[in-house]
Each structure stands twice: as C-alpha cells, then as structure tokens.
Amino acid sequence: LAVSTRVLPSGAWGVLMYGRIGAQWLQGQLLRGEACGCEAGGFGTLCFGAAVALTDGLLAVGNPCNNTVHVYRQVFEGLGGGKPSFPSWQPDAVLTSGWGSGPWGSRFGAAVDITPSFLIVGAPSARQLPPDQPLPVSSFAHVFYRGARSNASWSLLYESETGCCLRSLACCPGRPRPGGVGTSVA
C-alpha cells in the first residue's frame, strides 16, 4: 500500500509505504521526494507522490512539478528470529520529460500506471509558460517498455499527443481548457 503524504517539519512530500503481515498492516518505509519548488503558491499537490501506482514489486511515483517519475523495486528483508520478511523499496529508475518544469511545465508524472513490463505516464499540460501566455497547449501520454527482464532499463515506446495551436479553437489561451490527454492513465 502506498500513500502520498506531507513530510513534516520540512513540508516536502513523500510516499509512505505499508506492508501486511498476517492480518495486520504495518507502517514501513517513507520514500522522500526531492524539493520541487511547487510547495509555495498552492502547487504542493504537484510534488512527489502526486500520482502513485503499485504492482508486482514495482512502484511508480510521479512528481509533475519536476517532470519526473521515480520507479522503485521491492526488496524483502528478514525481520530475524523466524519472523516473516518485510518489504523495503530501492530506487530502480528516474524518468524525465524534456518539457519545462515548475507549476507551468508539462506536469509529466501527474498520472502514472505500471505493470512489470509497461509504464504509462501522463503529462496533461505540456507548455512552458504560464497559461496567460499565448502559446499552444499540448498534452501527452507516454508509454515506456522494459521487457521481461527485471534489470532492463525503461525505453520510450509510444507518445500520444493532443494539441491546440489555432486561437479560434476552444482550448486556446483565454478560453476554457480541456482536461487533455494524460490527465488520468491506466
């Protein structure tokens, strides 16, 4: 079980892991994210842990303010004395986007989903300037593949994009913006 949380007293964001031993859920490791600069100005929900996905010993954690997705691998460590093992999480990969970062970046990592071989990352707001600037708005869903080997690296397999570049379209600056591709992924 993975739950995003505010890490006090620093105010940064993290992901708190829980594991189940028998009928009991136990609090485990706290995965701390890097500072992203979005905490100020009400953009804290765009930080590390904005999106999490967990499957088969892999965890994907989105940090859309920094345009990163962190992938962790589950490792079991014995508790000793014949007690069952409890999982810990080790960094496996960090994926990034080439679009700008900060609250007006692409928000790569705003949505994530993961399987043992595939990782889908939403970037619903691919623009490099604040929304009052007259630039097109594009949004992406990125699909990464790593293959059957657990030690293989993630490779970009496919990008799905939608864009807006004509001022007369409803999604252009000064008009309501659509949710866009990459707002949610599964």
Image: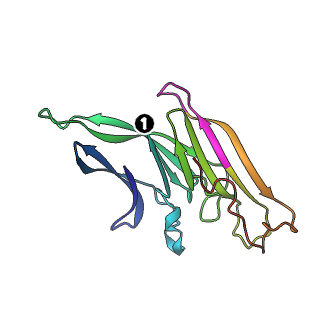
Magenta segment range?
141-153
Q: Position of residue 145 (x, y in %)?
A: 59, 33
Residue 79 lies, with reference to residue 168, above or below; the image says above
The reply, left or right, for residue 161 in relation to residue 29 is right
The structure residue drawn at horizontal position 32% and vertical position 41%, both measured from the top left corner, is 88
Tell me how the rendering is colored.
rainbow
The structure residue drawn at horizontal position 71% and vertical position 60%, both measured from the top left corner, is 127
Amino acid carrying mark 1 in the image: Asp
The reply, left or right, for residue 146 in relation to residue 57 is right
Q: Position of residue 70 (x, y in %)?
A: 49, 46
The structure residue drawn at horizontal position 52% and vertical position 73%, both measured from the top left corner, is 42
Q: Position of residue 181 (x, y in %)?
A: 69, 54
Residue linked to disc 1: 56
Looking at the picture, tell me which residue is in the foreground, 144 or 128: 144
Looking at the picture, tell me which residue is in the foreground, 170 or 70: 170
Could you say which quadrant of the image residue 103 lies in? bottom right
Total labels: the figure holds 1
The structure residue drawn at horizontal position 26% and vertical position 50%, both measured from the top left corner, is 25
Q: Residue furthest left?
A: 81
Residue 165 lies, with reference to residue 109, above or below; the image says below
Q: Residue furthest top?
A: 149
Task: Give the prevailing secondary structure in the magenta stretch.
Answer: loop
